[in-house]
Image (cartoon, grey):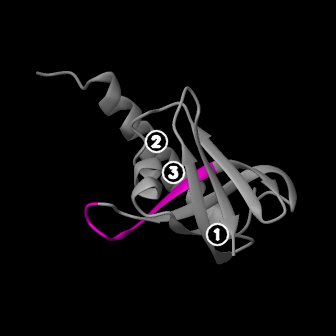
Amino acid sequence: MTLPSPDQITRTGFRLLNQIVEPALDRGIGNPLPVGVGAVVVETTGRVSGLPRRVPLMTSRLGDRLVVSTVRSDSQWLANLEAEPRARVRIAGEYRDATAETTRGPLNVAVLQLD
């Protein structure tokens, strides 16, 4: 019997957490106010599949600008935004179009400007 790798355990854990968190965020629960911290659902376009990919993320918001980040260099949502910077963000139960600027480093950052 082969034990799962730490990476497989992490990915499975995030998938399970996202299944719980995403429905609440879809209703606007936990979203940031126009200035503040909270969580949103970011929808990217899969760089290989071309299909919509949704992920709940913590964000800092200042008006129509949201900052999301990760220390994980293998985050698929970040790679998708690098390949296609147009995205959608679900806030207060509605999707809004956004454009992302990404920066890689010790803290991988995407700044999403809501249209």
Image position of 53 with respect to 1: above or below: below
Q: Is residue 32 magenta?
A: no
> Circle 2 sits in a helix, a strand or a loop, which is it?
helix
Residue at left offset 24%, top offset 26%: 4
Label number found at residue 14: 2
Residue 83 figure quarter = bottom left
Q: Position of residue 53 (x, y in %)?
A: 42, 63
Q: Position of residue 91 (x, y in %)?
A: 71, 68
> Which dot, 1 or 3, sits closer to the camera?
1
Question: Residues under labels 3 and 2: Cα distance?
Answer: 6 Å
Question: Residues under labels 1 and 3: Cα distance?
Answer: 14 Å
The amino acid sitting under disc 1 is Arg
Q: Classify mark 2: residues with Cα within 10 Å, few (<14), some (14-19) or many (20+).
A: some
Sequence-first disc among 1 and 2: 2
Question: Residues under labels 1 and 2: Cα distance?
Answer: 19 Å
* Magenta highlight: main SS: strand
The residue wearing badge 3 is 18
The amino acid sitting under disc 3 is Asn
Label number found at residue 43: none
> Which dot, 1 or 2, sits closer to the camera?
1
Quarter of the image that includes the N terminus = top left
Nearest the camera: 107 or 28?
Answer: 107
Nearest the camera: 107 or 9?
Answer: 107
For the record, the magenta segment spans: 48-57
Q: Classify mark 3: residues with Cα within 10 Å, few (<14), some (14-19) or many (20+).
A: some
The residue wearing badge 1 is 90
The amino acid sitting under disc 2 is Phe
Q: Are marks 1 and 3 in contact (CB under 8 Å)?
A: no
